[in-house]
Image: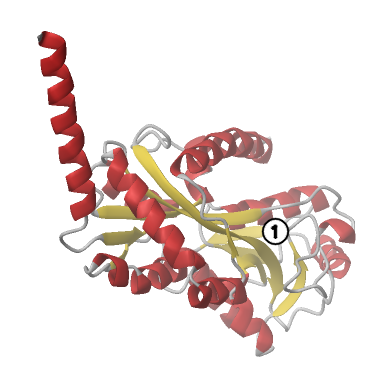
């Protein structure tokens, strides 16, 4: 008799959970971006948030909370309600910061990974006033003027910064780091001449390259990128083994019901694979990934190990 009661109770709970998933969302779902407007994570958030209401029948406001390399946004999710109505849009800075400093959450256990949306290579760009047209010339100039060149980044815990730091280390350069609160702000710093170079996502710097306001020297991927085949890699310019890409994903609170996480994942997959949005992402330099929550969790865990080694080397 007791086993029958347990089966009945389990059936009731399963039905309730399924009903809850089917009803989600019944109010606005907020996306919190840990960087300023205009950067890669902000662009992805706004593109997805524009199309999700057609599936959900609810608005998806985007809120920028820049600072601390994305930790402010992540903290808001880790310390918020576990209902799926607040989502953090993160970069792989989420897996770098814990190796640099104390963070107010566990980068794995405090969150429910929802989806890794896309990745993008970083492009090495310089201000056009700098008299260099390839990586070898940049290295030669930096060596001739130690400490005179500065590079911008979207923050000291971001992959764009570590692309620059790896470049500096591998080339044996003395350059000054200037952190900003987002990649768009770093690009503005470069355009204004505050810094002379940076690694940035194509989504942030593409218009400036096309206008001639910035000069692209190389790409951070191990092979040339199909969408920009004329841009050489850093590796083929003498720094063998150099590679550094950025990715963009979405997290929810760790205790968000799994059925809600799966629904958000499935609906975002539909949105990013819709032809118009998919082409928009690709045209702005993103490679769409759209994996499962379980696959995203493994990416986070493996990246924590990989970046810990990079951070250790940066300190030594």
Q: Is mark 1 on a helix, strand or loop?
A: loop
* Residue denoted by label 1: 175
Does the image show residue 190? no
| Residue positioned most to the top | 1
Q: Position of residue 148 (x, y in %)?
A: 71, 66
In depth, the one of 27 and 67 nearer the eye is 27
In depth, the one of 204 and 248 nearer the eye is 248
In depth, the one of 80 and 307 nearer the eye is 80
Does the image show residue 144? yes
Q: Is residue 38 left or right of residue 222?
A: left
For the C terminus, the image quarter is top right
Q: Quadrant of residue 37?
A: bottom left
Could you tell me which residue is drawn at 50 percent across and 43 percent down? Answer: 296
**Above or below for 238 versus 198:** above
Q: Where is residue 214 in the image (x, y as percent from the top left)?
A: 67, 81
In depth, the one of 37 and 301 nearer the eye is 301
**Above or below for 117 versus 18:** below
């Amino acid at each position: 008799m007791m086993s029958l009661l347990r089966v009945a109770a389990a059936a009731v709970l399963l039905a309730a959970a399924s009903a809850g998933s089917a009803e989600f969302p019944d109010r606005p779902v907020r996306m919190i971006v840990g960087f300023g407007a205009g950067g890669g994570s902000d662009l992805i958030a706004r593109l997805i948030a524009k199309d999700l209401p057609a599936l959900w029948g609810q608005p998806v406001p985007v809120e920028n909370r820049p600072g601390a390399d994305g930790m402010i946004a992540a903290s808001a999710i880790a310390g918020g309600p576990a209902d799926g109505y607040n989502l953090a849009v993160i970069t792989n800075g989420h897996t770098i910061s814990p190796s640099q400093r104390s963070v107010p959450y566990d980068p794995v256990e405090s969150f429910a990974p929802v989806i890794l949306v896309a990745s993008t290579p970083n492009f090495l760009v310089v201000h056009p006033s700098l008299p260099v047209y390839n990586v070898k010339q940049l290295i030669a100039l930096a060596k001739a003027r130690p400490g005179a060149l500065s590079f911008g980044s979207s923050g000291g815990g971001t992959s764009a910064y570590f692309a620059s730091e790896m470049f500096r280390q591998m080339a044996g350069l003395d350059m000054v780091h200037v952190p900003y609160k987002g990649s768009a702000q770093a690009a503005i710093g470069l355009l204004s001449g505050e810094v002379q170079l940076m690694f940035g996502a194509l989504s942030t710097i593409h218009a400036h390259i096309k206008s001639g306001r910035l000069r692209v020297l190389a790409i951070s991927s191990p092979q040339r990128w199909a969408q920009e085949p004329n841009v050489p890699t850093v590796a083929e310019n003498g720094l063998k083994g150099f590679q550094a890409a950025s990715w963009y994903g979405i997290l929810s609170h760790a205790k968000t019901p799994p059925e809600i996480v799966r629904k958000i994942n499935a609906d975002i997959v539909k949105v990013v694979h819709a032809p118009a949005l998919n082409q928009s992402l690709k045209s702005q330099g993103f490679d769409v990934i759209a994996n499962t929550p379980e696959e995203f969790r493994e990416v986070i865990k493996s990246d924590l190990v990989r970046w810990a080694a990079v951070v250790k080397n940066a300190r030594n």
